[in-house]
Image: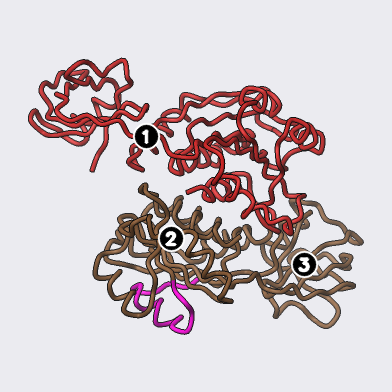
Chain colours: A brown, B red
Amino acid sequence: MNIFYAPPSQIHHNFAELTGQEATHASKVLRVREGDRLVVVDGQGGRYEGPVERISETSLQVRLEERQQVSAPAPELILGMGIIKKRDRLEFAVEKAVELGARHIALFRSEHTIKKNVRTDRLESIALSAMKQSLRSWLPEISVFLSVEEVIERFSDVPCLMAHEKVSSDTGGGNEAASVADKEDRLLLLVGPEGGFSPTEAERAQEEGARLVSLGAYRLRAETAVVAFMSRFL
Amino acid sequence: MNIFYAPPSQIHHNFAELTGQEATHASKVLRVREGDRLVVVDGQGGRYEGPVERISETSLQVRLEERQQVSAPAPELILGMGIIKKRDRLEFAVEKAVELGARHIALFRSEHTIKKNVRTDRLESIALSAMKQSLRSWLPEISVFLSVEEVIERFSDVPCLMAHEKVSSDTGGGNEAASVADKEDRLLLLVGPEGGFSPTEAERAQEEGARLVSLGAYRLRAETAVVAFMSRFL
Protein backbone atom coordinates (compact mmCIF):
# COMPACT_ATOMS: atom_id res chain seq x y z
CA MET A 1 0.00 0.00 0.00
CA ASN A 2 1.23 3.49 -0.82
CA ILE A 3 0.33 6.41 1.32
CA PHE A 4 0.50 10.01 0.11
CA TYR A 5 0.93 13.18 2.08
CA ALA A 6 -0.85 16.49 1.85
CA PRO A 7 -0.50 19.05 4.65
CA PRO A 8 -3.73 20.15 6.38
CA SER A 9 -3.81 23.32 4.24
CA GLN A 10 -4.26 21.12 1.15
CA ILE A 11 -7.10 19.08 2.62
CA HIS A 12 -10.30 20.78 1.45
CA HIS A 13 -13.95 20.10 2.10
CA ASN A 14 -14.25 17.18 -0.25
CA PHE A 15 -10.90 16.77 -1.93
CA ALA A 16 -7.19 16.68 -1.14
CA GLU A 17 -4.55 18.16 -3.38
CA LEU A 18 -1.18 16.51 -3.80
CA THR A 19 1.54 18.84 -5.05
CA GLY A 20 5.31 18.91 -5.54
CA GLN A 21 7.18 15.64 -5.06
CA GLU A 22 4.07 13.85 -3.84
CA ALA A 23 2.28 14.62 -7.10
CA THR A 24 5.30 13.75 -9.24
CA HIS A 25 5.89 10.52 -7.35
CA ALA A 26 2.26 9.49 -7.76
CA SER A 27 1.81 10.35 -11.42
CA LYS A 28 5.29 9.83 -12.88
CA VAL A 29 6.81 7.07 -10.74
CA LEU A 30 3.82 5.05 -9.59
CA ARG A 31 1.82 5.93 -12.70
CA VAL A 32 -1.36 6.59 -10.79
CA ARG A 33 -4.32 7.22 -13.13
CA GLU A 34 -7.66 8.97 -12.73
CA GLY A 35 -10.05 6.70 -10.86
CA ASP A 36 -7.30 4.93 -8.86
CA ARG A 37 -7.96 4.94 -5.12
CA LEU A 38 -5.35 6.54 -2.88
CA VAL A 39 -4.78 6.91 0.83
CA VAL A 40 -3.76 10.42 1.88
CA VAL A 41 -2.56 11.45 5.34
CA ASP A 42 -2.15 15.00 6.57
CA GLY A 43 0.55 14.34 9.16
CA GLN A 44 -1.82 15.47 11.92
CA GLY A 45 -3.71 12.22 12.32
CA GLY A 46 -6.09 12.81 9.42
CA ARG A 47 -6.35 9.83 7.09
CA TYR A 48 -8.40 9.97 3.91
CA GLU A 49 -9.23 7.66 1.08
CA GLY A 50 -10.82 8.13 -2.29
CA PRO A 51 -10.40 8.10 -6.08
CA VAL A 52 -8.13 10.38 -8.07
CA GLU A 53 -10.33 12.91 -9.88
CA ARG A 54 -7.89 15.04 -11.79
CA ILE A 55 -4.20 14.86 -12.70
CA SER A 56 -2.36 17.91 -13.98
CA GLU A 57 1.31 18.60 -14.63
CA THR A 58 1.91 19.76 -11.09
CA SER A 59 -0.87 18.43 -8.94
CA LEU A 60 -3.28 15.63 -8.33
CA GLN A 61 -6.73 15.85 -6.78
CA VAL A 62 -8.17 13.06 -4.69
CA ARG A 63 -11.88 13.03 -3.81
CA LEU A 64 -12.29 12.29 -0.11
CA GLU A 65 -14.84 9.54 0.32
CA GLU A 66 -13.59 8.22 3.63
CA ARG A 67 -12.10 10.19 6.47
CA GLN A 68 -10.71 9.08 9.78
CA GLN A 69 -8.89 10.77 12.64
CA VAL A 70 -6.10 8.47 13.89
CA SER A 71 -5.17 9.10 17.51
CA ALA A 72 -1.56 9.92 18.22
CA PRO A 73 0.67 7.14 19.57
CA ALA A 74 0.71 6.97 23.37
CA PRO A 75 2.78 7.87 25.23
CA GLU A 76 3.59 10.92 23.14
CA LEU A 77 7.35 10.68 22.66
CA ILE A 78 9.45 13.79 22.21
CA LEU A 79 12.96 12.87 21.17
CA GLY A 80 15.73 15.30 22.08
CA MET A 81 18.79 14.22 20.15
CA GLY A 82 22.28 15.68 20.00
CA ILE A 83 23.34 16.54 16.46
CA ILE A 84 25.35 13.60 15.13
CA LYS A 85 28.38 14.50 13.03
CA LYS A 86 28.05 11.93 10.26
CA ARG A 87 25.19 12.80 7.98
CA ASP A 88 24.14 9.24 7.18
CA ARG A 89 23.98 8.35 10.87
CA LEU A 90 22.01 11.48 11.73
CA GLU A 91 19.56 10.81 8.91
CA PHE A 92 19.26 7.21 9.98
CA ALA A 93 18.44 8.25 13.54
CA VAL A 94 15.72 10.62 12.31
CA GLU A 95 14.24 7.98 10.01
CA LYS A 96 14.14 5.40 12.82
CA ALA A 97 12.71 7.87 15.33
CA VAL A 98 9.80 8.53 12.96
CA GLU A 99 9.26 4.82 12.32
CA LEU A 100 9.19 4.25 16.07
CA GLY A 101 6.60 6.96 16.58
CA ALA A 102 8.32 10.18 17.70
CA ARG A 103 5.92 13.12 17.79
CA HIS A 104 8.58 15.79 17.90
CA ILE A 105 12.29 15.59 17.12
CA ALA A 106 14.31 18.27 18.89
CA LEU A 107 17.88 18.35 17.60
CA PHE A 108 20.31 20.17 19.80
CA ARG A 109 23.91 21.25 19.89
CA SER A 110 25.74 20.14 22.99
CA GLU A 111 29.18 20.35 24.53
CA HIS A 112 30.23 17.23 22.61
CA THR A 113 28.62 18.24 19.32
CA ILE A 114 31.11 18.47 16.49
CA LYS A 115 28.83 19.29 13.60
CA LYS A 116 27.04 22.57 14.09
CA ASN A 117 24.61 22.85 11.22
CA VAL A 118 21.96 20.56 9.91
CA ARG A 119 19.88 20.68 6.78
CA THR A 120 16.43 20.42 8.26
CA ASP A 121 14.85 20.34 4.78
CA ARG A 122 16.60 17.02 4.07
CA LEU A 123 15.61 15.67 7.47
CA GLU A 124 12.00 16.72 6.93
CA SER A 125 11.93 14.90 3.65
CA ILE A 126 13.35 11.78 5.34
CA ALA A 127 10.77 12.08 8.11
CA LEU A 128 8.00 12.30 5.51
CA SER A 129 9.17 9.13 3.74
CA ALA A 130 9.50 7.30 7.03
CA MET A 131 5.99 8.30 8.10
CA LYS A 132 4.55 6.94 4.86
CA GLN A 133 6.73 3.82 4.94
CA SER A 134 5.58 2.91 8.43
CA LEU A 135 1.95 3.64 7.56
CA ARG A 136 1.71 6.31 10.22
CA SER A 137 -0.54 9.36 10.10
CA TRP A 138 1.43 11.73 12.29
CA LEU A 139 4.42 13.65 10.95
CA PRO A 140 6.80 14.77 13.69
CA GLU A 141 7.95 18.36 13.81
CA ILE A 142 11.73 18.74 13.55
CA SER A 143 13.33 21.67 15.30
CA VAL A 144 16.84 22.72 16.23
CA PHE A 145 17.93 24.04 19.63
CA LEU A 146 21.17 25.61 20.79
CA SER A 147 21.59 23.39 23.83
CA VAL A 148 20.02 20.48 25.65
CA GLU A 149 18.92 22.91 28.37
CA GLU A 150 16.89 24.79 25.79
CA VAL A 151 15.14 21.55 24.89
CA ILE A 152 14.37 20.79 28.53
CA GLU A 153 13.05 24.32 28.99
CA ARG A 154 10.87 24.14 25.89
CA PHE A 155 9.30 20.90 27.16
CA SER A 156 9.46 21.76 30.85
CA ASP A 157 5.99 20.32 31.47
CA VAL A 158 7.00 16.90 30.14
CA PRO A 159 8.64 14.20 32.31
CA CYS A 160 12.18 13.72 31.08
CA LEU A 161 14.45 10.67 30.79
CA MET A 162 18.09 11.17 29.80
CA ALA A 163 20.11 8.25 28.42
CA HIS A 164 23.45 8.30 30.16
CA GLU A 165 26.17 5.67 30.03
CA LYS A 166 27.55 6.56 33.43
CA VAL A 167 24.44 5.27 35.22
CA SER A 168 25.00 1.87 36.73
CA SER A 169 22.92 -0.67 34.86
CA ASP A 170 21.99 -2.00 38.30
CA THR A 171 19.42 0.75 38.45
CA GLY A 172 17.65 -1.11 35.66
CA GLY A 173 17.14 1.89 33.43
CA GLY A 174 15.20 -0.04 30.86
CA ASN A 175 12.57 -1.40 33.17
CA GLU A 176 12.38 1.90 34.92
CA ALA A 177 11.82 3.62 31.59
CA ALA A 178 9.04 1.21 30.73
CA SER A 179 7.37 1.63 34.10
CA VAL A 180 7.52 5.42 33.79
CA ALA A 181 5.96 5.14 30.36
CA ASP A 182 2.99 3.27 31.77
CA LYS A 183 2.17 6.24 33.92
CA GLU A 184 2.88 9.21 31.66
CA ASP A 185 1.10 10.32 28.54
CA ARG A 186 4.02 12.47 27.35
CA LEU A 187 7.74 11.81 27.68
CA LEU A 188 10.87 13.68 26.67
CA LEU A 189 13.71 11.27 25.84
CA LEU A 190 17.18 12.79 25.65
CA VAL A 191 20.08 11.15 23.81
CA GLY A 192 23.49 12.79 23.42
CA PRO A 193 25.62 13.05 20.29
CA GLU A 194 28.84 11.02 19.84
CA GLY A 195 30.61 11.18 23.18
CA GLY A 196 27.39 11.56 25.13
CA PHE A 197 26.45 14.32 27.53
CA SER A 198 29.05 16.24 29.51
CA PRO A 199 28.91 15.93 33.32
CA THR A 200 27.62 19.52 33.47
CA GLU A 201 24.81 18.77 31.03
CA ALA A 202 23.79 15.68 32.98
CA GLU A 203 23.86 17.60 36.28
CA ARG A 204 21.80 20.49 35.00
CA ALA A 205 19.29 18.12 33.43
CA GLN A 206 18.91 16.37 36.77
CA GLU A 207 18.41 19.70 38.50
CA GLU A 208 15.58 20.32 36.05
CA GLY A 209 14.01 17.01 37.07
CA ALA A 210 15.38 14.67 34.38
CA ARG A 211 16.02 11.07 35.40
CA LEU A 212 19.15 9.40 34.09
CA VAL A 213 18.65 5.94 32.62
CA SER A 214 21.13 3.39 31.34
CA LEU A 215 20.79 1.64 28.00
CA GLY A 216 23.01 -1.24 29.08
CA ALA A 217 26.60 -1.95 29.97
CA TYR A 218 28.15 -1.34 26.56
CA ARG A 219 28.91 1.81 24.62
CA LEU A 220 26.29 2.48 21.95
CA ARG A 221 26.66 4.78 19.00
CA ALA A 222 24.39 7.81 19.24
CA GLU A 223 21.97 6.60 16.57
CA THR A 224 21.82 3.13 18.14
CA ALA A 225 20.97 4.70 21.48
CA VAL A 226 18.09 6.58 19.81
CA VAL A 227 16.62 3.39 18.41
CA ALA A 228 17.23 1.31 21.53
CA PHE A 229 15.69 3.97 23.77
CA MET A 230 12.62 4.56 21.61
CA SER A 231 12.05 0.83 21.09
CA ARG A 232 11.29 0.45 24.79
CA PHE A 233 8.05 2.34 24.26
CA LEU A 234 6.77 0.43 21.23
CA MET B 1 39.94 4.29 24.22
CA ASN B 2 40.91 2.28 21.15
CA ILE B 3 40.60 -1.47 21.12
CA PHE B 4 42.48 -3.69 18.70
CA TYR B 5 41.64 -7.13 17.45
CA ALA B 6 43.77 -10.23 17.04
CA PRO B 7 42.14 -13.62 16.47
CA PRO B 8 42.93 -16.35 19.04
CA SER B 9 45.55 -17.83 16.67
CA GLN B 10 47.56 -14.60 17.03
CA ILE B 11 47.45 -14.54 20.81
CA HIS B 12 50.64 -16.24 21.99
CA HIS B 13 51.98 -17.10 25.41
CA ASN B 14 53.14 -13.61 26.28
CA PHE B 15 52.42 -11.44 23.27
CA ALA B 16 49.70 -10.70 20.74
CA GLU B 17 50.40 -9.96 17.11
CA LEU B 18 48.33 -7.43 15.20
CA THR B 19 48.46 -7.87 11.44
CA GLY B 20 46.75 -6.57 8.30
CA GLN B 21 44.38 -3.63 8.72
CA GLU B 22 44.65 -3.72 12.50
CA ALA B 23 48.41 -3.18 12.31
CA THR B 24 48.12 -0.51 9.63
CA HIS B 25 45.39 1.30 11.51
CA ALA B 26 47.45 1.29 14.70
CA SER B 27 50.79 2.33 13.26
CA LYS B 28 49.82 4.50 10.28
CA VAL B 29 46.52 6.08 11.31
CA LEU B 30 46.71 6.26 15.09
CA ARG B 31 50.53 6.57 15.05
CA VAL B 32 51.00 4.11 17.88
CA ARG B 33 54.67 3.94 18.97
CA GLU B 34 56.75 1.33 20.81
CA GLY B 35 55.98 1.52 24.51
CA ASP B 36 52.35 2.73 24.04
CA ARG B 37 49.84 0.59 25.92
CA LEU B 38 47.09 -1.06 23.90
CA VAL B 39 44.01 -3.11 24.62
CA VAL B 40 43.63 -6.19 22.43
CA VAL B 41 40.57 -8.44 22.24
CA ASP B 42 40.40 -11.84 20.54
CA GLY B 43 36.68 -11.84 19.74
CA GLN B 44 36.20 -14.87 22.03
CA GLY B 45 36.02 -13.01 25.31
CA GLY B 46 39.79 -12.68 25.77
CA ARG B 47 40.88 -9.16 26.64
CA TYR B 48 44.52 -8.23 27.00
CA GLU B 49 46.52 -5.16 27.78
CA GLY B 50 50.17 -4.26 27.54
CA PRO B 51 52.84 -2.17 25.83
CA VAL B 52 53.80 -2.32 22.16
CA GLU B 53 57.15 -4.09 21.89
CA ARG B 54 57.89 -4.09 18.21
CA ILE B 55 56.47 -2.42 15.10
CA SER B 56 57.31 -3.67 11.63
CA GLU B 57 55.95 -2.80 8.19
CA THR B 58 53.20 -5.40 8.43
CA SER B 59 52.71 -6.24 12.08
CA LEU B 60 52.78 -4.99 15.60
CA GLN B 61 53.58 -6.98 18.74
CA VAL B 62 51.97 -6.23 22.06
CA ARG B 63 53.36 -7.74 25.28
CA LEU B 64 50.51 -9.18 27.33
CA GLU B 65 50.80 -7.93 30.87
CA GLU B 66 47.15 -8.19 31.82
CA ARG B 67 44.66 -10.81 30.68
CA GLN B 68 41.02 -11.20 31.41
CA GLN B 69 38.25 -13.51 30.19
CA VAL B 70 35.06 -11.49 29.67
CA SER B 71 31.91 -13.57 29.95
CA ALA B 72 29.56 -13.53 26.99
CA PRO B 73 26.45 -11.34 27.20
CA ALA B 74 23.45 -13.15 28.66
CA PRO B 75 21.10 -14.22 27.27
CA GLU B 76 23.14 -15.38 24.28
CA LEU B 77 21.33 -13.84 21.33
CA ILE B 78 21.42 -15.50 17.95
CA LEU B 79 19.97 -13.20 15.32
CA GLY B 80 18.44 -14.82 12.26
CA MET B 81 17.90 -12.06 9.73
CA GLY B 82 16.47 -12.15 6.22
CA ILE B 83 18.87 -10.70 3.66
CA ILE B 84 17.92 -7.05 3.12
CA LYS B 85 18.11 -5.82 -0.44
CA LYS B 86 19.69 -2.42 0.10
CA ARG B 87 23.31 -2.78 1.05
CA ASP B 88 23.49 0.19 3.40
CA ARG B 89 20.46 -1.03 5.34
CA LEU B 90 21.81 -4.58 5.56
CA GLU B 91 25.17 -3.30 6.76
CA PHE B 92 23.48 -1.02 9.23
CA ALA B 93 21.48 -3.94 10.65
CA VAL B 94 24.64 -6.01 11.08
CA GLU B 95 26.47 -3.13 12.75
CA LYS B 96 23.62 -2.53 15.18
CA ALA B 97 23.19 -6.24 15.94
CA VAL B 98 26.85 -6.39 16.98
CA GLU B 99 26.57 -3.23 19.07
CA LEU B 100 23.54 -4.72 20.80
CA GLY B 101 25.39 -7.93 21.61
CA ALA B 102 24.49 -10.60 19.01
CA ARG B 103 26.63 -13.72 19.38
CA HIS B 104 25.82 -15.16 16.00
CA ILE B 105 24.28 -13.50 12.95
CA ALA B 106 22.56 -15.98 10.66
CA LEU B 107 21.57 -14.33 7.38
CA PHE B 108 19.04 -16.23 5.35
CA ARG B 109 17.26 -16.08 2.04
CA SER B 110 13.51 -16.24 2.34
CA GLU B 111 10.45 -16.19 0.14
CA HIS B 112 10.45 -12.40 0.21
CA THR B 113 14.19 -11.98 -0.25
CA ILE B 114 15.07 -9.99 -3.34
CA LYS B 115 18.83 -9.83 -3.06
CA LYS B 116 20.39 -13.26 -3.17
CA ASN B 117 24.06 -12.72 -2.50
CA VAL B 118 25.90 -10.97 0.27
CA ARG B 119 29.52 -10.04 0.65
CA THR B 120 30.24 -11.61 4.01
CA ASP B 121 33.79 -10.22 3.99
CA ARG B 122 32.40 -6.68 4.08
CA LEU B 123 29.92 -7.63 6.79
CA GLU B 124 32.67 -9.25 8.85
CA SER B 125 34.72 -6.11 8.63
CA ILE B 126 31.71 -4.04 9.77
CA ALA B 127 31.11 -6.47 12.63
CA LEU B 128 34.73 -6.12 13.71
CA SER B 129 34.53 -2.32 13.77
CA ALA B 130 31.27 -2.43 15.67
CA MET B 131 32.70 -4.82 18.27
CA LYS B 132 35.62 -2.49 18.89
CA GLN B 133 33.43 0.62 18.83
CA SER B 134 31.10 -0.77 21.48
CA LEU B 135 34.05 -1.98 23.61
CA ARG B 136 32.88 -5.57 23.38
CA SER B 137 35.13 -8.63 23.51
CA TRP B 138 33.01 -11.08 21.57
CA LEU B 139 32.92 -11.08 17.78
CA PRO B 140 29.79 -12.69 16.36
CA GLU B 141 30.08 -15.30 13.67
CA ILE B 142 28.28 -14.37 10.44
CA SER B 143 26.86 -17.16 8.33
CA VAL B 144 24.49 -17.46 5.41
CA PHE B 145 21.63 -19.95 5.15
CA LEU B 146 19.37 -20.87 2.25
CA SER B 147 16.12 -20.52 4.19
CA VAL B 148 14.75 -19.57 7.57
CA GLU B 149 13.98 -23.25 8.16
CA GLU B 150 17.66 -24.03 7.83
CA VAL B 151 18.40 -21.47 10.53
CA ILE B 152 15.78 -22.95 12.85
CA GLU B 153 17.18 -26.42 12.21
CA ARG B 154 20.77 -25.32 12.86
CA PHE B 155 19.71 -23.83 16.20
CA SER B 156 17.01 -26.37 17.00
CA ASP B 157 18.07 -26.54 20.65
CA VAL B 158 17.55 -22.79 21.15
CA PRO B 159 14.15 -21.26 22.07
CA CYS B 160 12.98 -19.21 19.11
CA LEU B 161 11.04 -15.93 18.82
CA MET B 162 9.92 -14.77 15.38
CA ALA B 163 9.00 -11.10 14.82
CA HIS B 164 5.77 -11.06 12.85
CA GLU B 165 3.60 -8.08 12.05
CA LYS B 166 0.43 -10.13 11.81
CA VAL B 167 0.43 -10.92 15.53
CA SER B 168 -2.05 -8.80 17.42
CA SER B 169 -0.19 -6.38 19.63
CA ASP B 170 -2.71 -7.35 22.32
CA THR B 171 -0.59 -10.40 22.95
CA GLY B 172 2.02 -7.98 24.21
CA GLY B 173 4.89 -9.38 22.19
CA GLY B 174 7.40 -7.08 23.76
CA ASN B 175 6.71 -7.99 27.33
CA GLU B 176 6.43 -11.60 26.41
CA ALA B 177 9.83 -11.42 24.74
CA ALA B 178 11.34 -9.85 27.83
CA SER B 179 9.80 -12.43 30.14
CA VAL B 180 11.06 -15.28 27.97
CA ALA B 181 14.53 -13.72 28.07
CA ASP B 182 14.54 -13.82 31.84
CA LYS B 183 14.22 -17.57 31.76
CA GLU B 184 16.43 -18.61 28.85
CA ASP B 185 20.17 -18.41 28.51
CA ARG B 186 20.10 -18.65 24.71
CA LEU B 187 17.56 -17.22 22.29
CA LEU B 188 17.11 -17.29 18.54
CA LEU B 189 15.47 -14.09 17.27
CA LEU B 190 14.10 -14.20 13.72
CA VAL B 191 13.43 -11.08 11.65
CA GLY B 192 12.30 -11.23 8.03
CA PRO B 193 13.60 -9.19 5.09
CA GLU B 194 11.57 -6.39 3.49
CA GLY B 195 8.01 -7.70 3.25
CA GLY B 196 8.43 -9.95 6.29
CA PHE B 197 7.90 -13.69 6.46
CA SER B 198 5.47 -15.48 4.18
CA PRO B 199 2.51 -17.24 5.84
CA THR B 200 4.16 -20.59 5.05
CA GLU B 201 7.39 -19.56 6.72
CA ALA B 202 5.55 -18.38 9.80
CA GLU B 203 3.52 -21.59 9.98
CA ARG B 204 6.51 -23.86 9.62
CA ALA B 205 8.45 -21.88 12.21
CA GLN B 206 5.56 -22.30 14.63
CA GLU B 207 5.47 -26.02 13.93
CA GLU B 208 9.13 -26.08 14.92
CA GLY B 209 8.27 -24.40 18.20
CA ALA B 210 8.91 -20.75 17.36
CA ARG B 211 6.71 -18.17 19.09
CA LEU B 212 5.48 -15.23 17.05
CA VAL B 213 5.89 -11.84 18.69
CA SER B 214 4.74 -8.40 17.61
CA LEU B 215 7.01 -5.37 17.56
CA GLY B 216 4.09 -2.96 17.71
CA ALA B 217 1.18 -1.83 15.63
CA TYR B 218 3.13 -0.10 12.85
CA ARG B 219 5.12 -1.42 9.93
CA LEU B 220 8.85 -1.33 10.63
CA ARG B 221 11.61 -1.55 8.09
CA ALA B 222 13.59 -4.78 8.36
CA GLU B 223 16.66 -3.14 9.88
CA THR B 224 14.51 -1.20 12.37
CA ALA B 225 12.86 -4.44 13.43
CA VAL B 226 16.31 -5.93 14.08
CA VAL B 227 17.31 -3.06 16.36
CA ALA B 228 13.93 -2.82 18.10
CA PHE B 229 13.84 -6.58 18.73
CA MET B 230 17.40 -6.84 20.02
CA SER B 231 17.03 -3.74 22.20
CA ARG B 232 14.50 -5.56 24.33
CA PHE B 233 17.26 -7.75 25.68
CA LEU B 234 19.78 -5.02 26.55
Does the residue at mark 3 contact the one at mark 1 (Cβ under 8 Å)? no
- Report the front residue among A62 and B191: B191
Label 2: how many Cα within 10 Å (few below 14, some 14–19, many 20+): many
Dividing the picture into quadrants, the one containing residue B65 is top left
Q: Is residue A197 left or right of residue B52?
A: right
Disc 3 versus disc 2: distance between alpha carbons? 39 Å
Label 3: how many Cα within 10 Å (few below 14, some 14–19, many 20+): many
Q: Is residue A227 left or right of residue A168?
A: right
Residue A155 marker: none
Q: Earlier in the sequence, mark 3 or mark 2?
A: 3
Q: What residue sits right under mark 3 in the picture? A: A40
Disc 3 versus disc 1: distance between alpha carbons? 51 Å
Which label sits in the foreground, 3 or 1? 1
The image shows residue A99 at horizontal and vertical percentages of 61, 58
Does the residue at mark 2 contact the one at mark 1 (Cβ under 8 Å)? no
Residue type highlighted by circle 1: Ser
- State which region is magenta: A142-160
State whether residue A33 is above or below residue B65: below
> In which quadrant will I find the C terminus of chain A?
bottom right
Dividing the picture into quadrants, the one containing residue A47 is bottom right
In the structure shown, which secondary structural element does the residue marked by tag 1 occupy?
A: loop
Residue type highlighted by circle 2: Gly
- Report the front residue among B227 and A99: B227
The image shows residue B161 at horizontal and vertical percentages of 65, 40
Residue shown at the point (38%, 36%) measured from the top left: B131
Q: Chain of mark 1?
A: B
Q: What residue sits right under mark 1 in the picture? A: B71
